[in-house]
Amino acid sequence: MATTDQLIICEHCDCVYEKVTLAKHQKALCTCCGGVLQRHNSLSVQQRLALSITATVLWIFANFYPVMSISMKGLKNSATLWDSVVALSQGPITFIALVAAISIIIAPMFQLLLLIWVLGFALTSQRSPGFKVCMRWLETLRPWSMLEVCLLGAMVAVFKLAGLLDVIPGIGLFALAVLSLLLIRIAGRDVRELWDTL
Amino acid sequence: MNRPPLASELNLCLCHSCGLACDITDNPHECPRCGAPLHARKTNSLTRTWAYLLTSLVFYIPANLLPVMNTSLFGSGSDSTIMSGVLEFWQHGAWDIALIIFIASIAVPGIKFVAISLLLITVQRGSLWARKERSKLYRFVELIGYWSMLDVIVVALVAALVKFQALGDIQPRLGILFFGLVVVFTMLSAMSFDPRLIWDNQREKPPNEEVMDEVASH
C-alpha cells in the first residue's frame, strides 16, 4: 500500500506513472493520450486561504448588491443574483430556478465555506473535522459551479437591455467578475494536494 | 515498446475523488484515503451516457421551438425563442453578441451531441481509430459543457430587471426550462462517459509518440 502513494494514474487512459516534481509553469502530460497528469501548484496554503477569504467577501458583495440597474422613463429597477433566480421560479419552470440557484449561488458558496474550513485547519498542519467529506464535496461541487458563465451572462444581459433602456452595471457585477476569476484559481483540482501534505 | 504500464496490469485503480492510486488486490469497495466508492470503470458507462444523451436530445427540440421569454413593451407583447434572440442581435448589428449566444446556446449543445455520439459509437465498435484525438475530444466536451447555461442566466437577469407592469415586462417562458434540462443532461452524459474505454481495446499496439513532461509556459 505504501508504495502506491508515489504513483499517478492517468484518468483518461489508465496509464501509470511515477510522480515527478514540477517547476513553475510546468505540467506533466500522459504519453499515451496527452491528458494532463500533474500541474505545478503555485499556491501555498496561506495564499489559498487568503484568497478564499477574499472570495467570500466578494461573494457577499456579489449577492447582496445589485448586479445591474435599469431606468426607463423615470422608473428604476435593480436586480441581484437572487432576484434573477426568483424571476425564474415563477410558473411551471421552477426546476430551472433550482439549477440556476445551485450553479450561481449555492455551489460557489459551499465551495468557499469548505475551502476556508479545510484550509483553516491546514494552516496548523492538521486535518479538519470531516476532512474526507469536505474534500469529496469540493470534488462534487466543482462541475456545477458556473460563476464564469454567470459573468458572461450578466454582460450579455447588459448589452441586450442597453438597446431598450439605460443600464447601469452595479457593484455586484464587478464583485462577480473578480469572484469568478478567483474561484477558478482557488477551487481547482490542485486542492487535492492537501491529501498528500496533511 | 514504450507504453507505460496500465493500472489493471499493476492491480491498481484510480480513485476519482482524491486521485490516489489504490491497490485493488483485496477488492476494496472504497478508497482507503477518502472513502469514495472505487470502480475500475464507471458503472454502466455506455448505457448511462446513451440514456442521458438521448434524454437531452429529446429536450433539445422543445428548447429550440418553444419561446424562452416574453417581452411586452408599451402593451405589445412578443415571444422570443433562442434563435430569434440571436437573429435580433444580428439584425441590430451586434454580431459579436449574436455570435456569443449562438455558440453558447446552439453550437455547444450541437457539438456535444455529435461528439458524445461519436465517442460512444467508436467505443462500442472497439475502434482503434484516432484514440489520442478522441481523448482530446472528450476533454474538449467536458470543458465546453456548462457554457450553455449562458442563456438561462441572461433570461433570468433580464426577467428580474424589466418589471414595470404596463410599461414593460419580461417573463421567462417554458422553453428555458427545457433548455436548462438540455444543459444538465448533456453534462450528466459527459460525466457518465468513461474516457478509459477508448483505450481498453487491443492495448498491444504500442503508441509511438514520446512526449514526456512537456513544458508549457503560459
Image (spheres, rainbow, N blue to C red):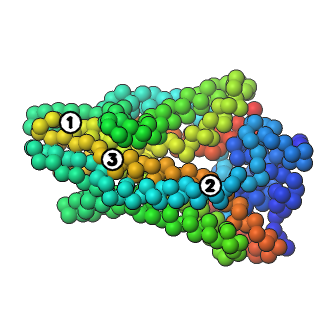
Left/right of residue B172 with respect to residue B169 in the rendered view: right
> Residue at left 13%, top 45%?
B73
Asked if the residues shown at circle 3 and circle 1 are in contact, with their CB atoms under 8 angstroms apart, the answer is no
According to the image, label 2 marks what residue? Answer: B48
Q: Position of residue A141 (x, y in %)?
A: 57, 39
Mark 3 or mark 1: whose residue is earlier in sequence: 1
Circle 3 residues within 10 Å: few <14, some 14–19, many ≥20: some
Q: Nearer the viewer, residue B162 or B122?
A: B122
According to the image, label 1 marks what residue? Answer: B163
Q: Nearer the viewer, residue A38 or B76?
A: B76
Q: Position of residue B132 (x, y in %)?
A: 66, 69
Q: Disc 1 marks which amino acid? A: Lys
Q: Disc 3 marks which amino acid? A: Leu
Q: Nearer the viewer, mark 2 or mark 1?
A: 2
The residues bearing labels 3 and 1 have C-alpha atoms spaced at a distance of: 19 Å
> Residue at left 66%, top 35%?
A135
- Mark 3 and mark 1 on one chain: yes
> Label 2: chain?
B
- Mark 2 and mark 1 on one chain: yes
Count of numbered circles in the view = 3
Q: Disc 2 marks which amino acid? A: Arg
The residues bearing labels 2 and 1 have C-alpha atoms spaced at a distance of: 42 Å
The residues bearing labels 3 and 2 have C-alpha atoms spaced at a distance of: 26 Å
Q: Nearer the viewer, residue A59 or B84?
A: B84
Circle 1 residues within 10 Å: few <14, some 14–19, many ≥20: some
Quick check: A16 above or below A97?
below
Q: Is residue A95 something one can see in this rendering?
A: yes
> Label 1: chain?
B
Q: Is residue A68 something one can see in this rendering?
A: no
Q: Position of residue A42 (x, y in %)?
A: 63, 44
According to the image, label 3 marks what residue? Answer: B174
Q: Nearer the viewer, residue B57 or A182?
A: B57
